[in-house]
Image (cartoon, helix red, strand yellow):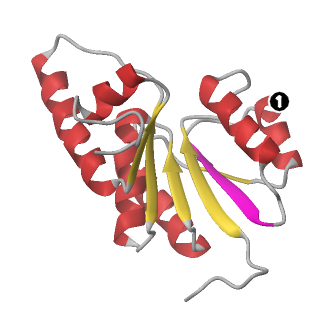
């Protein structure tokens, strides 16, 4: 089904939260402030409780905000809540801002046929625990498989999530 000239380009952002003052939130505010609201509609999935002050900007710009059960409380409920939102909204883009956790919404989007699936990493950290290193290695690989595009806020962040072969200039292998 092709887009009609009057249809909005529908973008879903998944974030840990929309709390006031976060780096991800600042980036998204800049993007939305510059976007033409006649051509784009923005929806958010947040994994943390409401922060009315942090959300005010997005609501004033006409964004829709959904809250899902945090993965730590119930991974299964989180998965199915995200799936229901993506399935019922016919998004053109799913853009995940949760580092390793990008895998969940991007996998769902891939399974539901969303063509543009962006994994966006904002930080980097390492653990000395072997079990955490193994888990991160698995999620790193899965993220690369389910994302159609890889973005990072720095070369170090990109190398951390996508590996040394990641190319900062083209945002992909």
Tell me where residue 128 appears, x and y as whole percent: 18, 10
Where does residue 163 sit, x and y in percent of width and height? 23, 31
Query: Residue 33: x, y in percent?
Result: 81, 43
Which residue is label 1 attached to?
53
Q: Residue 77: within the magenta? A: no
Q: Nearer the viewer, residue 82 or 74?
A: 82
Q: Is residue 124 above or below residue 99?
A: above
Q: Is residue 74 visible?
A: no
| Front one among 29 and 163 | 163
Q: Is residue 140 left or right of residue 102?
A: left
Q: Residue furthest top?
A: 128
Query: Relative to 2, does residue 35 appear above or below in the rendering?
Result: above
Q: Does 120 appear above or below 164?
A: below
In which image quadrant can residue 150 be found?
Answer: top left
Left/right placement of residue 86 relative to residue 9 reads left
Span of residues in magenta:
39-46
Name which residue lies at 45% across and 50% down. 118
Q: Residue at x 68, y 38 (%)?
A: 28
């Amino acid at each position: 089904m092709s887009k009609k000239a009057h249809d909005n380009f529908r973008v879903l952002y998944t974030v840990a939260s929309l709390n006031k003052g976060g780096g991800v939130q600042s980036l998204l505010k800049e993007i939305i402030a510059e976007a033409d609201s006649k051509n784009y509609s923005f929806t958010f999935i947040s994994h943390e409780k409401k922060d009315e002050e942090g959300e005010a900007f997005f609501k004033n710009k006409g964004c829709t905000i959904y809250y899902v059960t945090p993965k730590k409380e119930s991974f299964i409920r989180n998965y199915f809540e995200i799936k229901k939102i993506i399935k019922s909204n016919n998004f053109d883009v799913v853009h995940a801002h949760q580092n390793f956790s990008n895998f969940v919404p991007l996998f769902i989007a891939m399974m539901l046929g969303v063509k543009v699936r962006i994994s966006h990493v904002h930080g980097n950290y390492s653990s000395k625990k072997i079990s955490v290193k193994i888990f991160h290695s698995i999620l790193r690989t899965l993220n690369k498989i389910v994302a159609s595009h890889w973005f990072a806020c720095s070369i170090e962040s990109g190398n951390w999530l996508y590996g040394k072969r990641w190319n900062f200039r083209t945002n992909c292998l």
